[in-house]
Image: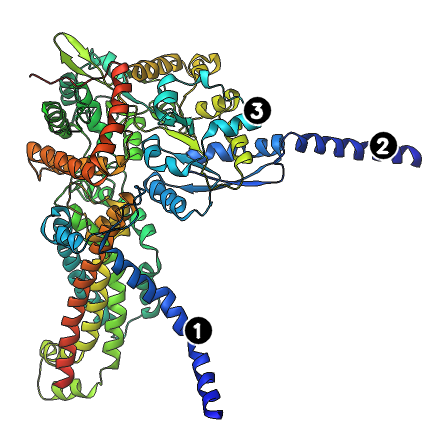
Amino acid sequence: MRGRIKIVLCLMAVLILAGTAGVFAQSPYAGETITVAVHAVPHATAVYNFQDQFLKETGIKVKVIEMTADVMYEKYMTEFIGGTGAYDVVQMNPQWLADTSPYLAPLKPLADKEGLDFKLDDLVPKFRDLYCSWLGVWYGMPWDGDVHLLYYRKDIFDKLGIEVPKTWKEYRDTASFLNGWDWDDDGEIEYGCTEYLKKDRMYWWFLDRFASYGGVYFDEDMNPLVNTKSGMMALKNMVECLPYMPPGSLSWSYMEVRTALVKGDAAMGKQWTCVGKAAENPEESKVVGKMNYALVPGAQWDGEIYYRPMIAGGWDLTIPKDSKKKGAAITFLHFITRPDISLQIVMDPNTSLDPYRLSHYTSPVFRALWPTAGDYLDAINANLDKGFPDLLIPGTAEYMNALTYEITQVLAGTKDAKKALDDAAKAWNEITDNLDRETQKKLWNGQYDAMKALGIVYKEWKD
Amino acid sequence: MKSGRKKLKRYSFVLPAVILLIVITIFPLVYSLTLSFFHWDLRRPLGWRFAGFSNYARALFSDHRFHRSLITTGIIGVSAVLLEFLLGLGLALLLSRKLVGKRILTTLLVMPVMISPVVAALMWRMLYHEKYGAINAILRLLGFGTGPSWLGSPHLAPFSVVLVDAWQWTPLFMMILLAGLQSIPIEPHESALVDGASRPQVFWHITLPMLKLSIIAALLIRLVDVIKLFDTVFILTSGGPGSSTETVSYYVYLVGFRFFRVGYAASLSYLLLAIVVVIALGFLRILRRREVG
């Protein structure tokens, strides 16, 4: 009997050792710990959810550093400039790639060295071609495929026989009609629309309008076009829509707008992709099964509607040049953006991370997640198809801050629209001069050429 | 020989403190002052380029956003400090009397000072929410309609920032003034009362003048502090709506850490320092006059 027990124990020990060896043999970086800087929960949830599986598969541990979107840029830049090597993987806004690329490790050599296939053909082309590279060098893997969608209350629109607004004028009129009365019979007054207008990142809500009225950031000579008729029309529409938004909207950011939509306080609103999943999450939403999705409105041009929804931000995962554990870091990037893992992440409403692989949009599992999930994915695709990219040159954070400073003064009623946009253009010129006009011009024309190839070119508004 | 050793021994005791002072205070001051005379944009690979006084000239004569932020800081700062002084003085007078539960009350009143300004601002951001915030919920219960838009109105937002600052820092005034009140001898009050002075007369002519030193100290500490107001604005409003709550510290932060124009940010910081020094000198002159008097 004793002999048998000994044999069984020996066999078990051999199996455990073999199993452990098997696991750790899968990565030459087993035993390393990488530091991953990501947007605080909800985004960080995705890393927390999969760090154990990553450890099991590779033997690499993950230490998560959470930070808010507001402070990421300056935290990264100060660490990069200091050459601290504090992070091995960082969540990066594509807008910052122009400024941060000197401090990032190109991904291709790392992927080639480790023999990792990132299945780049499966990435949405606009994310892959515009938001992951800088000057032709691949620095980031998408992590969150953001684009603006128009969310609206299908039940209310159907009940009242209202058409989904296709132009900004229709959007304003629909918001006006649905504002200030109890259209869902819950005993509370509801509002026409809701938008992110807090001073930090509200410029995207201006740019959807600006671009559809024919605007682009600069002309070929680097003259700002923000103070053209396109800018004026965009700002005029924003000011006209403001009375139909919930009180306090000028201080509202992502979470307040999301809350207003999923709690049924507003009939419609422009928001990032993740709100669609939140609206179908019964733990958070009062409008499960009642929300629908459409193209962000556009501007009417000679009978044709010109849609330009913002491909607003989104997030990449990148590897700093100073990281001492680039091998483990690229292994993590490959794991977390793998089609099977990333599908689980983008389907989870608690991560607020959105689809970015073509296979995400066609996944039968995702399309069956709730009854209108297919419509949701199709709406994202439709908005992406007509999407307008961010400004992707050095100093974008400063250009956008100067624009926001002026626009919010107009919305607050403390400055005239024309004066504000002229001042924004003046500030943009100063920023361009400060960063070297010729360099900026060359880089902007590089982006503008890519935009022209997508059919996005400045058109002067005649109205 | 012996005295030389003694001297060396004495210096060796002081040396670590001197080195520490040079490293953490003198060096950063000299470094940033030098930097303020250079163009240095961390986003560009050009390094330092001599700028002379151009950073200062730009700040003083053509940066309207800086000027606007100075005015905003002045409005918010003076309003906050005045409100804190009045409330703090009232509470100090209340607590200088015999009260049931005085210790518990004092402890509760002092608690906001112990909270991090970021946490306090986050808490108030939730309280201020137009629909789901507690303040408007109470106002609705009391029949005041839907309640105001605390952070969304350019006219009300500065007041909302002042309110948060006052909530957090009134206890500091209270503590300093309470300590001042407790150090005032009782005899002059008793003599005045015996001579037929009324309570308000005693307060105006005896208590307040004897409290002057504590008041000036508290005002100086808070004014210098409020000029650096940043955390509350960052969390509550990001300086909006419009430019209504963009304080000078918030603007300097943007220039230095968002736009990485560190040379210019250094010059703005030194202008801010100059303002603080002028205010401090003003208060010190009042103090000196009192001492001479």
Would residue A129 appear left or right of A422 to someone viewing this image? right
Please tell me if label 2 and label 3 are on a single chain.
yes
Q: Quick one: B273 or A428, which is closer to the camera?
A: A428
Please tell me if label 3 and label 1 are on a single chain.
no
The colour scheme is rainbow
* Residue receiving disc 2: A8
The number of callouts visible is 3
Q: Residue at x 15, y 34 (%)?
A: A407
Q: Quick one: B164 or A55, which is closer to the camera?
A: A55
Q: Residue at x 14, y 89 (%)?
A: B191
The type of residue carrying mark 1 is Pro
Q: Is residue A369 above or below residue A15?
A: above
Would residue A328 appear left or right of B258 to someone viewing this image? right
Q: Which label's residue is closer to the chain start, 2 or 3?
A: 2
Q: Quick one: A146 or A109, which is closer to the camera?
A: A109
Pinpoint residue A275: horizontal percent, then vertical percent.
34, 25
* Residue receiving disc 1: B16
Distance in Å between CA atoms under marks 2 and 3:
39 Å
Q: Residue furthest bottom?
A: B2
The picture quadrant where one finds residue B268 is bottom left
Distance in Å between CA atoms under marks 1 and 2:
65 Å
Q: Determine whether the residue tagged by mark 2 lies in a helix, strand or loop.
A: helix
* Residue receiving disc 3: A115
Q: Quick one: A198 or A192, which is closer to the camera?
A: A198
| Picture quarter with the C terminus of chain B | bottom left
Q: Nearer the viewer, mark 1 or mark 2?
A: 1
Assess whether mark 1 and mark 3 are in contact (beta carbons under 8 angstroms).
no
Neighbours of disc 1 within 10 Å: few (<14), some (14-19), many (20+): few
Pinpoint residue A375: horizontal percent, then vertical percent.
35, 12
The picture quadrant where one finds residue A405 is top left
Please tell me if label 1 and label 2 are on a single chain.
no
Q: Determine whether the residue tagged by mark 3 lies in a helix, strand or loop.
A: loop
